[in-house]
């Protein structure tokens, strides 16, 4: 019978046999000296053994800021930070806000009272059997504070204070995890947007051209017309007007005039390069490049003539400002057409200069009207007019 009792007690003794103290605690104060009535912080940190074989259970409810007392100091409040764990220990921490309210402690050392912590060791035998040891006490020695002095007289070393507590560490870890999650979500969204853009770019190359599809935008066409008129003006200033220069100006002006009368310009694939590697010219057309990354050569032409612009004027639907613009456009088209189809002879450079100025003004006006905002306003205005006509009927 005695042998059996010894066999049962041996595992319990081995479970409670730990290499270090089951409980260790220490104080840390925010300041080394205080004034009467001045709030300061005191942090209590404890390390308890917590393994599979033995667990130290501390009576922590008595350490709560609403319960604990540190006479002659007054407890103003406090907090309990989240516990930290290692392989064999668990650390818990309490932060207290104290102040001294006694009036006869000036120039003296006032100590935090001796603090008693009750605990017991809970041992585990086997998988389900748990044994609770006897109640024990851990005495935390007093901590002196100097009133209106740098350090207390019994201080053995310099107290290095730290702004980091368990609560601060837990809050920073939470913010770090939150920022990591937000960053991951933003990275995924950026990847999805990049994938969508890549799919759309690849779709442009793989999607076959359909009837009525516009290979070039109006803004690109108008920018190309502007570059062509600028080149014509530069060559005219350098060597005067020539029949070929007038033809180029006429082709650009007809494109701008097509926009002015509300018609669509023509788009055709440009001719391939000639044997000498240069662009083969196409009469009455403007060669532009559109598309990314390798631009496609598009031949753009306008169908506007003097007769079509005159017919637009005869409709009488334009306001006074637009009427003046169309009338100047008729004169410019007449001038360039005469230079193109007229008999060979001296060119009227003054008239051609005026026609070139008119072409520049018309182009500037068309760029404004072909803006996305102006298009939306024009479409809304047209819809309103149709509604008014429907109601009038």
Image (tube, rainbow, N blue to C red):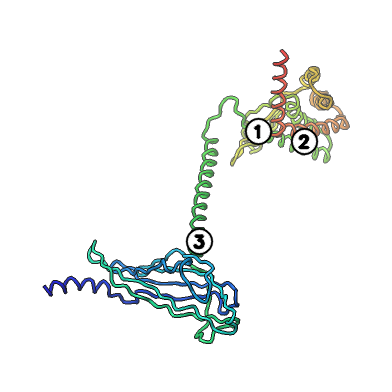
Q: Are marks 1 and 3 in contact (CB under 8 Å)?
A: no
Q: What secondary structure is found at the residue carrying circle 2?
A: helix
Measured from the top left, where is residue 197 in percent x and y? 54, 41
| Few, some or many residues within 10 Å of mark 3 (<14, 14–19, 20+) | some
Q: Residue at x 46, y 65 (%)?
A: 80
- Residue linked to disc 1: 217
Labels 2 and 3: the sequence-earlier one: 3
Q: Nearer the viewer, residue 241 or 126?
A: 126
Quarter of the figure that contains the C terminus: top right
| In the depicted structure, whether residue 141 falls above or below residue 278 | below
- Left or right of 134? Residue 159 is right
- Residue linked to disc 2: 229
Q: Residue at x 27, y 73 (%)?
A: 16
Q: Name the front one of labels 2 and 3.
A: 3
Labels 1 and 3: the sequence-earlier one: 3
| In the depicted structure, whether residue 93 falls above or below residue 361 | below
Q: Are marks 2 and 1 in contact (CB under 8 Å)?
A: no
The mark found on residue 10 in the picture is none
Q: Residue at x 59, y 79 (%)?
A: 103
- Residue linked to disc 3: 171
- Left or right of 225? Residue 271 is left
Q: Nearer the viewer, residue 168 or 32?
A: 32
- Left or right of 252? Residue 127 is left
What distance separates the C-alpha of mark 1 from that of mark 3? 55 Å
Q: What secondary structure is found at the residue carrying circle 3?
A: helix
| In the depicted structure, whether residue 170 falls above or below residue 332 | below
Residue that lies at the very extreme toward the bottom in this rendered image? 153
Q: Nearer the viewer, residue 286 or 8?
A: 8
Residue that lies at the very extreme toward the top in this rendered image? 393
- Left or right of 174? Residue 236 is right
| Few, some or many residues within 10 Å of mark 1 (<14, 14–19, 20+) | few
What distance separates the C-alpha of mark 2 from that of mark 3? 66 Å
């Amino acid at each position: 019978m005695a042998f059996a009792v010894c066999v049962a007690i041996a595992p319990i003794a081995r479970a409670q046999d730990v290499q270090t103290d089951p409980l260790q605690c220490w104080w840390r104060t925010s300041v080394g000296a205080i004034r009467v009535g001045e709030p300061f912080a005191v942090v209590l940190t404890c390390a308890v053994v917590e393994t599979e074989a033995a667990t130290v259970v501390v009576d922590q409810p008595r350490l709560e800021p609403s319960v604990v007392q540190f006479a002659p100091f007054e407890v103003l409040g406090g907090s309990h930070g989240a516990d930290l764990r290692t392989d064999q220990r668990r650390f818990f921490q309490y932060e207290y806000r104290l102040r001294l309210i006694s009036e006869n402690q000036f120039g003296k050392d006032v100590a935090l009272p001796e603090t008693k912590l009750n605990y017991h060791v809970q041992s585990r035998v086997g998988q389900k059997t748990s044994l609770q040891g006897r109640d024990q006490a851990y005495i935390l020695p007093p901590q002196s504070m100097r009133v209106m002095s740098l350090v207390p007289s019994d201080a053995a070393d310099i107290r290095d204070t730290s702004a980091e507590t368990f609560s601060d560490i837990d809050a920073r870890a939470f913010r770090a995890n939150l920022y990591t999650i937000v960053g991951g979500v933003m990275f995924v969204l950026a990847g999805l947007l990049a994938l969508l853009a890549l799919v759309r770019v690849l779709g442009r190359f793989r999607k076959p051209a359909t009837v009525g599809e516009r290979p070039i935008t109006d803004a690109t066409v108008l920018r190309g017309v502007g570059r062509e008129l600028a080149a014509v003006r530069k060559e005219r200033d350098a060597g005067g007007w020539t029949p070929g220069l007038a033809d180029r100006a006429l082709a650009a002006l007809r494109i701008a005039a097509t926009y002015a009368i509300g018609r669509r310009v023509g788009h055709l694939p440009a001719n391939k390069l000639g044997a000498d590697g240069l662009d083969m010219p196409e009469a009455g057309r403007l060669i532009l490049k559109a598309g990314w990354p390798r631009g496609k050569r598009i031949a753009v032409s306008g169908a506007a003539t003097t007769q079509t612009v005159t017919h637009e004027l005869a409709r009488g639907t334009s306001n006074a400002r637009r009427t003046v613009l169309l009338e100047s456009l008729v004169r410019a088209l007449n001038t360039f057409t005469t230079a193109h189809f007229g008999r060979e002879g001296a060119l009227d450079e003054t008239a051609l200069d005026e026609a070139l100025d008119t072409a520049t003004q018309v182009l500037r006006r068309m760029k404004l009207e072909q803006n996305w905002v102006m298009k939306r306003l024009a479409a809304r205005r047209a819809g309103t007019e149709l509604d008014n006509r429907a109601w009038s009927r």
